[in-house]
Image: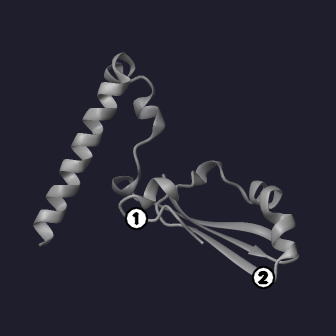
Amino acid sequence: MCAGVPELGAVGATLIMTPWLSPALLDAETQTNLTASKYTRVFLHAILGVEEKALYEWCRGFGWSKSTGTLPPAEQAPDFWKYKDDPELLRDPEGWCDREVVRILAELRQGQGSSS
């Protein structure tokens, strides 16, 4: 399974916040179903992580484990704490969101135009 798929529309739908995801939580949520399945191994690859690249592996009889690689700062997603006290966001959250959407769409369109 892949999470954080870097395609338009897929990132949000497949986002997993890896800093708070642990093998113990995955075991608690999936162990019963996976044990009853035909699978002996399952992989969950978080392609776009917040601050790490993560690969989770489930092995029958052992449960989930996690392997990570740290992303360079330039590739890390914006941190929640950066926005927590943003005065513009706190004053006008809907307007801020609208401006962010316009900004991101402009960046995406600019990127598409330069590749054609």
Q: Is residue 44 visible?
A: yes
Question: Which residue occupies the foreground of this view, 1 or 78?
Answer: 1
Q: Assign a secondary structure to mark 1.
A: loop
Against 19, residue 69 (above or below) is: below
**Quadrant in the rendering for residue 18:** bottom right
Pick whichever of labels 1 and 2 is earlier in the sequence.
Answer: 1
**Image quarter (top left, top right, bottom left or bottom right) of the N terminus:** bottom right
- Which one is nearer the viewer's eye here, 22 or 38? 38
Left or right: 78, with 34 as reference point? left
The residue carrying mark 2 is 39
Work out whether residue 51 can be spotted.
Answer: no
Q: Which label was assigned to residue 6?
A: 1
Q: Disc 1 and disc 2: Cα gap in Å?
A: 27 Å
Residue 84, position in %: x, y? 45, 27
The amino acid on which the numbered mark 1 sits, given as a three-letter code, is Pro
Q: Nearer the viewer, residue 70 or 81?
A: 81
